[in-house]
Image: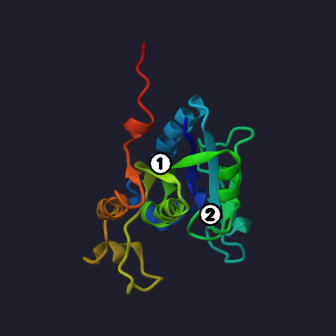
Amino acid sequence: MTQTALLVIDVQESFRVRPNWSEVNHPDIADRVNRLVHAARANGELVVWVLHTEPGTGGAFDPANGHVRFIDGLEPAEGEPLLTKTSHNAFTTTNLQQLLTQHGVREVVVSGIRTEQCCETTARVASDLGYDVTFVTEATATTPLPHWTMPADATLADVLADPRTLSPETIVERTEYVLAGRFATIRTLDEVAPPVLAS
């Protein structure tokens, strides 16, 4: 049987304190990820929790500011590994690969924030390392993406008013296009974590 690991990437308060969170495509991301977590635990699969940190930056990802913690409702169970990373993907600055090897993992299921950034980058690296990758887009979240020429201090209103800004729907579509058949299999929440029918 294939040993599978669920990766929960950066579902942390750091994102919720930013102005653009008001435009996030899945404000219920914690509930969506929790469905995967419960399914993985029920199947005896490994759940790996990842938090993004940018120490010394003074921003939302600086641990000193207290936002580098999981969104309410998400909590690792005893014995489930918790990794902190400083790179976009969950492998380069952690011992994730070693951990997966120790547990005999061959397939990883990717969930978290943001769809096109840390989740996509992790999926690509995992694929290159030889893992089968399942990307549950519905259990990822993202926010509008400004054009690269937009000043870093632009307001959310400016970003939303710019016709070049990519909507979360467009980002999701593009992410699925580039991952599917190359780096990952795209699957729905219902496929990976079938709804429990009331008896």
Quarter placement of the N terminus? top right
Given residues 164 and 123, the one toward you in this image is: 123
**Residue that badge 2 annotates:** 91
Position of residue 166 measured from the top left corner of the image (x, y, whole percent): 31, 70
* Left or right: 140 in relation to 68: left
Which image quadrant for residue 13? bottom right
Position of residue 37 measured from the top left corner of the image (x, y, whole percent): 56, 39
Which image quadrant for residue 162? bottom left
* Left or right: 192 in relation to 102: left
Residue 109 position (above or below residue 58): above
Which image quadrant for residue 163? bottom left
Residue 158 position (above or below residue 69): below
Give me the residue at 67% from left, 51% from top: 101
Give me the residue at 49% from left, 37% from top: 35
Q: Element type at marker 2?
A: loop
The three-letter amino acid code for the residue at tag 2 is: Phe
Disc 1/disc 2 C-alpha distance (Å): 22 Å
Q: Element type at marker 1?
A: helix
**Residue that badge 1 annotates:** 29
Tag 1 and tag 2, C-beta contact below 8 Å: no
Residue 163 position (above or below residue 5): below
The three-letter amino acid code for the residue at tag 1 is: Ile
Crowding around mark 1 (Cα neighbors within 10 Å: few <14, some 14 to 19, many 20+) is: many
First in sequence: mark 1 vs mark 2: 1
